[in-house]
Image (tube, rainbow, N blue to C red):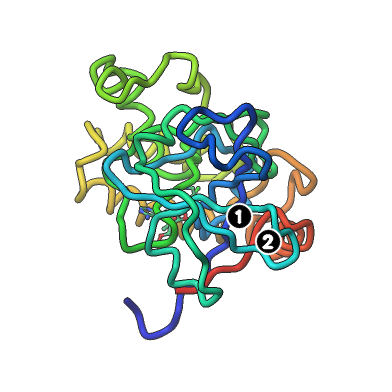
Amino acid sequence: EGVQPQEYTLIKMEVVKPFPLKLGSLEGKRVFLAAATLRPETMYGQTNAWVLPDGKYGAYEISETDRSALNLAYQNFSKIPQKPSCLVELTGYDLIGLPLRSPLSVNEIIYALPMSTILTNKGTGIVTSVPSDAPDDYMALHELKTKPDSRAKYGVKDEWVPSDIVPIINIPEFGDKAAEKVCLDLKIQSPNDKDKLVEAKRLIYLKGFTEGTMLVGEFVGRKVQEIKPIIKKKLIESNEAIIYRE
Ligand code: A2H
């Protein structure tokens, strides 16, 4: 934990009805998976969400203004100073395959899929996946796509796995799918190639911010640096996201 609190944008991904049996007791409510991101401007490129299969999640009533809204988040989410009460306890395994509607996403429906490298001490334990610009997301998706065993292990159906990466940002040095390029250049083999993934992230994150240009959406052609705060503000004003600090 740093000295300064980190400010995240919590993206509210709505669970599409009908709910599966495990979520039966939440029937009649709007239920969201809340994903902490530092890159709200990348939400156009979401292809799926990530959950930790063995992680423990809870459904918390957190919104003051919309009493029926619930967030599904890892249990440490009760750190939020609203004393949320947990309505249902679930595992990540229960969430795999949930269809979601997520703000800005070019894909109308995305699915919750398993990621074993999710940290349990960060954010909500739910991560939104943008494989065009995040090497961790690219490699986790690559693993699911190319290894049938990795899908079978968690009962992941082929139709939940996105076939295409959505290009959203151009970085002059790395093109329109920067994460894919850098993972290929560095010959990264798996989501557990920690050192190489650190290097991949070092290579593209700063440049994505300082030199990236939007390829899609309302701000197509504009610099990432200029429009990131605007997109963040809009998501919050439309109640599609909330600010979260830890
Ligand atoms: B970011 P920092 Cl496109 N475990 O969102 C592992 N990773 C987590 C997490 C958890 N519990 N909670 C959030 N994250 C990810 C988008 C993105 C992100 C892009 C590019 C870079 C990037 C799409 N995934 O992060 O350790 C989330 O992924 C750059 C670091 O607090 C979140 O933002 O710095 C980021 O890690 C927060 O990581």
The amino acid pointed to by label 2 is Lys
At 69% from the left edge and 42% from the top edge, which residue is drawn?
104
Labels 1 & 2 near each other (Cβ < 8 A): yes
Asked if residue 104 is positioned above or below residue 81 in the image, the reply reads above
At 48% from the left edge and 21% from the top edge, which residue is drawn?
160
- Residues 15 and 230: in front is 15
158 with respect to 103 (left or right): left
- Quadrant for the N terminus in the image: bottom left
Looking at the image, which residue sits at the far front?
A: 25
Q: Earlier in the sequence, mark 1 or mark 2?
A: 1
Q: Quadrant of residue 139?
A: top left
- Residues 143 and 27: in front is 27
Report which residue position mark 2 lands on.
Answer: 232
x and y percentages locating residue 129 in the rendered image: 48, 40
At 46% from the left edge and 27% from the top edge, which residue is drawn?
97
Q: Which mark is residue 40?
A: 1
The amino acid pointed to by label 1 is Pro
Callout 2 crowding tier (Cα within 10 Å): few <14, some 14–19, many ≥20: many
